[in-house]
Amino acid sequence: MSSLLISNARILRDGKLTRANILVSDGRVKSVTQNRKPAAEITVDAKGRVVLPGLVDAHAHLYDPAFTYREDFTSGTASASAGGVTTVIEMVLTTPVDSADRVRTKIDAGRRTSLIDFSLHAGMMNQNNLANIPAICGLGVRSFKTFTCKPYYADDHTLMSLMRETSMNHSILDVHAEDEEVANENFRRLQAAGRKDPMAHTEWKPNSAEQVAVQKLIRLAREIMARIHISHLSTAEGVAVIGKAKRDGVKISAETCPHYLTFTRKDMKKQGPYLKMNPSLKGPSDVAALWRGLRDGIVDIVTSEHAPGTRAEKEPGWEDIWKAWGGVPAIETMLPILLSEGVNKHRITLPTLQRVCCENPAKIFGFYPRKGVIREGADADLVMIDLKLRKKVRAAELHQKVDWTPYEGRMVKGWPVLTLRHSQTLYEDNQVVAKPGDAEFLQMNI
Ligand SMILES: [Zn+2]
């Protein structure tokens, strides 16, 4: 394999941008030098642009064999490549991935059809598949998804059993944290009032639903000494209770997603069912608290929570919001949105972006220092970004299967321009050039 030199790049070192020449070959970073330019067969002049480690997206729904009309490994990871994401942890959707056999089947599908390195979360976990945890861990999958609400509701007894089992097996319990009782109470009220409008969905699980669930999980995790990860945090209350739990030494991490950082429930008035998601969008003070949580290190990571549905699955929601698919396409727009709304609007710094999108997800899920960092010996998974490039988001130019995006027409400043995986070009000049077939399944070394 030929050697490639990215010259005149700027990379983050100790929180500061510094000039760097990055030499890569055989899929690895060979050297990072400041002044010396090592010889290479191919040289790419970065012209002072910033190069980040390829992003590690720890929560994306890319492949469910029952829903390949929405996305599959190849289309989803093409979209990821164009968005600077070079590692993905695929999240179970509706087809269970809860036994060693099912995990193996999904790993095989990923190896055959993914363009980027991947790992998996197993799920949805409950009393019936709890005994499979050791065998699944044996395959290198050490992250297990469960819910505190429907449709995969786990009662307290189940949550505690899962925490015991995951903690005995040195793994993580990932939880969709919205309280079932709070949701039920609101649902009864909304149904009695005949509410089917898009805004009704945002009233179903208000801030208290997340707060109550996260609080309960923290209390249980503290007692059992389990390691838990809160999926897609959406509220200021959630940030506050997690901040306190971290100060108290609870083994908890949390993620939020681009949509919770950029939209509020008000945006649903215009976009209606297209912004239906679970958890639902909240208010401006929640958005501010989530950005603050990223800066303060309380919210550890940003994930895309890529969960596209087709227009046909969204449209019925104008009439009856309960009938619409919940979820948005997000993997390709995650980095541009964070650069534009975060870095370029001074809500977070570039070092924070690198921490929450590269370093922390690689550390939490056990891929560090192979992923999430630019240094000698790490995988040559890199993304070159143009912080000044201004371009409108157009679904027609994205690489996902569905033909819409909630960011349609939004002017975004800051885009990836080149993505490499294992020193091979994945994406360049608006084109995904990689072919499936050599993606690696990554074991979680937790
Ligand atoms: Zn999800």
Image (tube, rainbow, N blue to C red):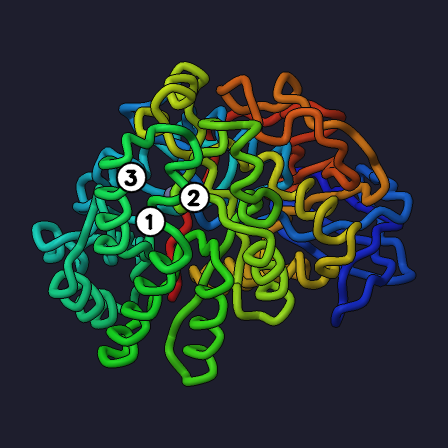
Q: Is residue 36 above or below residue 215?
A: above
Rendered image: mark on residue 121: 1
Q: Which quarter of the figure has residue 15?
A: bottom right
Name the foreground residue: 132 vs 212. Answer: 212
Q: What amino acid type should be assigned to the residue bearing mark 2?
A: Ser
- Residue 432 placed where, x, y %? 63, 25
User: Which secondary structure, mark 1?
Assistant: loop
Question: What's the amino acid at mark 3?
Answer: Leu
Question: Which of disc 2 and disc 3 is earlier in sequence?
Answer: 3
Q: Check if mark 1's residue and mark 2's residue have beta carbons within 8 Å.
A: no
Residue 438 point in image, percent of width and height: 47, 34
**Horizontal and vertical percent for residue 164?**
18, 71
Residue identifier under label 2 = 280
* Image height of 159 relative to 439, above or below: below
Q: Which mark is residue 190?
A: 3
Q: Nearer the viewer, mark 1 or mark 3?
A: 3
Q: How busy is the neighbourhood of tag 1: few (under 14 within 10 Å), some, or many (20 plus)?
A: many
Q: Residue at x 79, y 45 (%)?
A: 5
Q: Secondary structure at mark 2?
A: loop
Q: Residue furthest left?
A: 128
> Which residue lies at the image location 69% right of the left edge and 44% below the top edge?
383
Mark before the other along the chain sequence, 1 or 3: 1
Check the image and report above or below for 257 versus 389: below
Real-space Cα separation, disc 3 to disc 2, in angstroms: 15 Å
